[in-house]
Image (tube, rainbow, N blue to C red):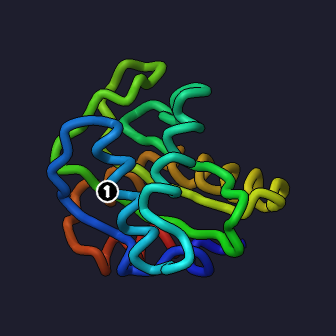
Amino acid sequence: MQISEILTPDRIQCKVECSSKKDALDIIAKSIAGGNYSLSQNEIFNCLLARERLGSTALGHGIAIPHGRLKHGSTTMTAFLQLKKGIDYDAIDQQPVDLLFALIVPEQSTDEHLQILSRLAEMFSDKKLVDQIRRTSNTGSIYELLTS
């Protein structure tokens, strides 16, 4: 699956003011819910928060991939958040997180979920790409970087 198939430019936010992990998850939930009227912001937030309670989804190096599976979900939904300043995210390397790529999949989509997570982890291990994303504050440019 290509990132361009699951991410749209309207679900990318740049240089967002944020003070905590919960605040970031709420911003992400609002972004995802805004494009899918069958799911509420609260339902998405609770899904992401429940996964975080199992362990941080921070990869290290300032990157996190909050994700979850929704019982009532019917399609894969994503959002990308670039923070103005990094936040504490309980990362194993103790570095603040400033880039978050969120993923919500239907509950039964286990294989798809793992494939997308693997693809995202691989993508965000590319230091050059991550540096380019951090240097830009333009939604269109970030979309191009994430989908190319």
Residue 110: which quarter of the image? Answer: bottom right
Residue at the spot 48% in from the left edge and 19% down from the top edge: 92
Residue 14: which quarter of the image? Answer: bottom left
The residue at which mark 1 appears reads as: 27
Eyeballing the image, is 94 above or below 148?
above
Q: Is residue 66 visible?
A: no
Eyeballing the image, is 123 above or below 51?
below
Residue 20 as seen in the image, left or right of residue 79: left
Position of the N terminus, as image quadrant, is bottom right
- Given residues 29 and 5, the one toward you in this image is 29
Percent x, y of residue 13: 28, 66
Residue 7 as seen in the image, left or right of residue 18: right
Residue 91: which quarter of the image? Answer: top left
Residue at the spot 59% in from the left edge and 71% down from the top edge: 3
Amino acid type at image mark 1: Ile
Residue at the spot 54% in from the left edge and 28% down from the top edge: 53
The number of discs equals 1
Residue at the spot 53% in from the left edge and 34% down from the top edge: 52
Residue 51 as seen in the image, left or right of residue 85: right
Percent x, y of residue 23: 28, 44
Percent x, y of residue 11: 39, 73
Callout 1: SS: helix
Q: Is residue 31 visible?
A: yes
- At label 1, counting other C-alpha atoms closer than 10 Å, the crowd grade (few under 14, some 14-19, many 20 or more) is some
- Given residues 144 and 114, the one toward you in this image is 114
Percent x, y of residue 59: 51, 35
